[in-house]
Image (cartoon, rainbow, N blue to C red):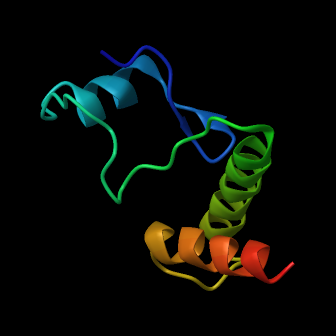
Amino acid sequence: YVKLAFHGLTQLSPEELSNLYDSSIVRESFDGQEYAMIDTLFSLSEAYLFVQLVDLKDEGKYPVLEQKKLYENLRRCQRRS
C-alpha cells in the first residue's frame, strides 16, 4: 500500500499513484538492487541529492538518461569524497 510518493521533489497525485502502484507486485522485502535503504543521516542526505538530480534530469539540465545510472553516479562521487 503506497499512500504518498514523489518523483523528484514533486508529490504524485492520487491518480498517478493508482496508475503506478495498483497493478504492481506485492513485495515481501525491499533488499534488491532497485532499492536503497535510507536508514542513516548520511543516506538521508544522499536521497535528497538524488531527488534534486531527478528534477534536474527532468528539466534537461543533467544528461544522464536512466535513474539507475543517476544513482550510480551519485554513489561514485560520494565514495570519492
Classify 58 as above or below 40. Answer: below
Q: Nearer the viewer, residue 49 or 28?
A: 28
Judge left or right: residue 49 versus residue 50: right
Rendered location of residue 74, percent (x, y): 68, 72
State the residue in front, 81 or 27: 81
The quarter holding residue 58 reads bottom right
Quadrant that contains the C terminus: bottom right
Q: Which residue corresponds to the image point at 45% horizontal and 69% vertical from the top-left?
A: 68
Rendered location of residue 39, percent (x, y): 63, 35
- Residue at 49 percent across and 49 percent down: it is 36
Q: Is residue 62 above or below residue 13?
A: below
Image height of 37 relative to 12, above or below = below
Front residue of 81 and 74: 81
Measuring 26% from the left and 30% from the top, which residue is drawn there?
21
Q: Residue 41, image x and y in percent?
A: 79, 38
Q: Is residue 75 left or right of residue 18?
A: right
Question: Residue 34 versus residue 39: which sits nearer the camera?
Answer: 39
Residue that extends furthest to the right in the rendered view of this protein: 81
Q: Is residue 18 above or below residue 77?
A: above
Q: Residue at x 41, y 18 (%)?
A: 14
Q: Quadrant of the N terminus?
A: top left
On the rendered structure, is 17 left or right of 77?
left
- Residue 75 occupies quadrant: bottom right
Left or right position of 60 against 70: right
Count of numbered circles in the view: 0
